[in-house]
Structure formats: structure tokens, C-alpha cells
Amino acid sequence: MDHECPTAPAPSPSPAGPPSCVPAVPCWVSLLSRDLPAATSFYGPLLGWTFRPAPSPWGPYLHGIADGAVVAGLAETARRRGFPVGWTTYFGTEDADAAAERIRSGGGTVAVGPLTFDGGRVVLGADSQNAVFGLWQAPARPPGRPCGPGAPVRTELRTRDAFAAAIFYARVFDWAERDGDGYDIRYEHDRVVLRVDGRAAATLRGGGTDGAAEPLLRPRWHVHFETADVDDAAARALRLGGRVLRPPVDTPYGRVAALQDAEGGLFHLVAP
């Protein structure tokens, strides 16, 4: 996911669930929360989301909706299972079971799944450098990804070794074998960048450190939500009980701020 919106059809105004995914690229995000009312009270006013219940075998689960499109999932699993509060990035896949086996054989771990959830097949695991991510095998329908304010529009991995991470994900998702289908991996702005049909789909950046006191430096996938005015939204996040980890700054990918929500979940705001 990145700022340049794809040309694929957008989700319908009243979608049944998450959009179908372009294979091998980030396409869905989900929050593990301890307190769903606290999460909705924060992200609703901050990103303009509304919410509706969605089925889940693990307890309360909501879809976050921006401009009529489902853009994120929010679960209360962190409290029920002792997981830390945080956002997880999911990659599209044609075969969740086969991709899960490639995670294991590539030195990563699979913690949950593959199993049926929210109308698709999901896997939750970690890569060979302990960054958590998921797989999403969605029902067959035209892929679509919401864009604009409130939508997750950029995904970046912070890790110890970006090139080793690129090798891991290339193996899990067969990036090299998809070259003829418009998939391209290149190095730019000190990052490994996956482009699909010329659009940046994900970036991988080195410099991460296991156990770092600074949460921004620990290996993880960072989710960026679009907002029209990052400075104004960062100030609003403070009023809602959040925390600004890094104030707004201009980057090659837009103006960006790093924040934590009212429960400590890390995320970013970005403006074109």
C-alpha cells in the first residue's frame, strides 16, 4: 500500500468485508486492542471512521469504515489472549496454506492459522527478523483498495537488514517469478521498494534493532493512514489521549508523523 492509488475498481459503497487483495502485496490492516470502545473513541474522531460489528470466533470485532469503504479491522484479542496492542499488515495471497509453509521454510514462524476468518483465509506469523505480518486469502472478486483520508495508504518495514528481509518476502510471495506481471524490486531513498505496475506497494528499510527502547526501531511493519493535514491530525491525536513519537516531518513519501494511540498502538499519519 502506498500513496499512489491503483487503477483497480474501488470497493463498493457497502462492501461485505475487506477488499479482495492483489497477490503478494500489503492489502489489509487489523488492530489488536485491549478495549474496543477506547479504540473507536480514538480512531473515529481522528480518521473520520465509522464502525460496524463483524463476525469473529475470538470475541468482539469491528470493521472501520471510511467514505463507505471497509479500511481496517479492530479486535479485542489483545486483552483476551495477552497480545500487545498493535497494528498488523496483511499481504494478499492466492494460497494461504502454501505461503505459510514458505514462511516456516524461510526461517519465519507461523503463530495462527491458516484458518477461515472474516470471509477469507488468514495466517498470522513473523518473518526471519521477528517482524509480525499476516496473510490474507480473500474470496475471488475484483481487487480493490480504498484511497484517500482515513485509508491505510502506505506500508513500510523497519528491520535490521532490509536486503535479507527482501529475500525472505520474495521467497514467501514469489516476487521474482511475478516480474512479467509488473512486479519490480528496486532500491531508492535508502529503502528496498516493491513496485507493482509502477506503483510503490511496500518499502523495506534497515536500521532496526531487536529490543530497542525506541519502538520505532524495533522490527515491524509500520502502517500509515492518510490525512489531509498531518500537523492538525497529530494535535488532535494528543487531545484524544494519544502520543506523538515523532512530530510531522517532510519525507520523500509525503509529510509523516509517528504516533501511538490511547492504548499504545503504534501507527503513522501521512499527507500527500
Image (cartoon, helix red, strand yellow):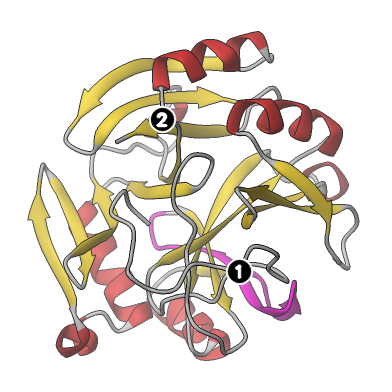
Label disc, if present, on residue 161 of the rendered structure: none
Residue 135 appears in which quarter of the rendering?
Answer: bottom right
**Is 52 in front, or is 181?**
52
**Cα gap from disc 2 to disc 1, whole angstroms:** 35 Å
Residue drawn at x 16%, y 84% is 179
Of circles 2 and 1, which is in front?
1
Q: On the rendered structure, is 190 left or right of 121?
A: left
Span of residues in magenta = 111-129
Instruction: Give x and y (percent) for residue 83.
Output: 72, 46
Q: Residue furthest front?
A: 13
Residue 26 appears in which quarter of the rendering?
Answer: bottom left
**Up-down: is 211 above or below 114?**
above
Residue under label 2: 216
Instruction: Give x and y (percent) for residue 123.
Output: 61, 73
Residue drawn at x 38%, y 74% is 8
Does dot 1 land on a helix, a strand or a loop?
loop
Identify the amino acid type marked 1. Answer: Ser
